[in-house]
Amino acid sequence: MDEKELERYARHILLPEIGGAGQARLLGAKVLVIGAGGLGSPVILYLAAAGVGTIGIVDDDAVDLSNLQRQIVHATERIGDAKTSSAAAAVAAINPGVTVVPITERLNAGNATRIIADYDIIADGSDNFETRFLVNDACFLAKKTLVSAAILRFDGQLSTFKAHAGDGHPCYRCLFPEPPPPDLVPTCAEAGVMGALCGVMGSLQAAEVIKEITGAGESLSGSLLIFDGLRTEFRKIKMHPDPACALCGADATIKALG
Ligand code: ZN
């Protein structure tokens, strides 16, 4: 690290759990953020500020006026721009030392393996179950750590999945074996979401990514954190691997995406 980097990251380097070695790991890390929306915004901003060396951003959408109530990586002057390039502009303003890889594609079974391959850790902030299951499967098959968050109305969930690491680590399918029928679960576009809730959950998601990279503290793998924003209550529920899981169980049937 040069003198400017030592100054920029001084408050991390002071922490014994991160220190110079942890900061060096952050500078060398490659994180893929799926969705530059409500959750992706704080994730991208905090990872950029933290000096994560390479941030890939997957999103095929453009910035819309109705996004700006919560998607704080974007700006009024960038309405109509691709969310990937808008987020890249915000990252450049915070920390020009970070390399952003804009991936302006919709993640699907055909491209997920290729896109994920280049990264150490995946942060999923997508807004639908189809993508969430696809990312979980792709990460397990590629042996990548996944930090996954979800939000709706005033409620949030967060966990880390690394079932490839072996005993005691569940995957997302251990918890939810199948996606719910699409018409059963409302989206934020249908049901609404408090903007600041995205900041609460996205900031926690960024913190867990930083912990996974630096090894600070305890991993959230094996626990599901649930936030009730109306009561301002957190609950942490223990999760166990499902031996019958179709993805990570002993007799797994899912061997490829699609
Ligand atoms: Zn599983």
Image (cartoon, helix red, strand yellow):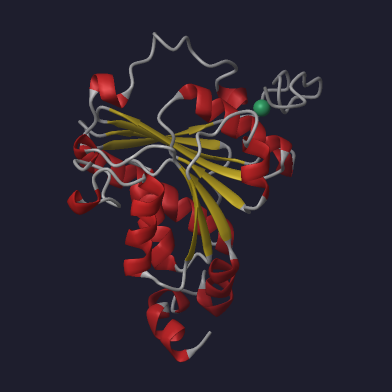
Locate residue 30 relative to residue 48 in the image: left or right.
right
Q: Nearer the viewer, residue 220 or 104?
A: 104
- Locate residue 230: give its quadrant: top left
At which x and y percent is residue 218? 54, 53
At which x and y percent is residue 222? 58, 37
- Locate residue 69: give its quadrant: top left
- Locate residue 201: give its quadrant: top left
Locate residue 185 relative to residue 124 in the image: left or right.
left
Asked if 65 appears above or below 247 in the picture, the reply is below
Residue at position x 58%, y 29% in the image: 108
Residue at position x 47%, y 68% in the image: 98
Residue at position x 56%, y 24% in the image: 175
In which quadrant of this rendering is ligand 1 seen? Answer: top right
Whether residue 155 is visible to the viewer of this picture, yes or no, is: yes
At which x and y percent is residue 56? 52, 53
Residue at the extreme bottom of the image, as rendered: 3
Q: Total label count?
A: 0
Residue at the extreme front of the image, as rendered: 80
Locate residue 252 relative to residue 70 in the image: left or right.
right
Q: Nearer the viewer, residue 91 or 224?
A: 91
Q: Nearer the viewer, residue 142 or 56?
A: 56
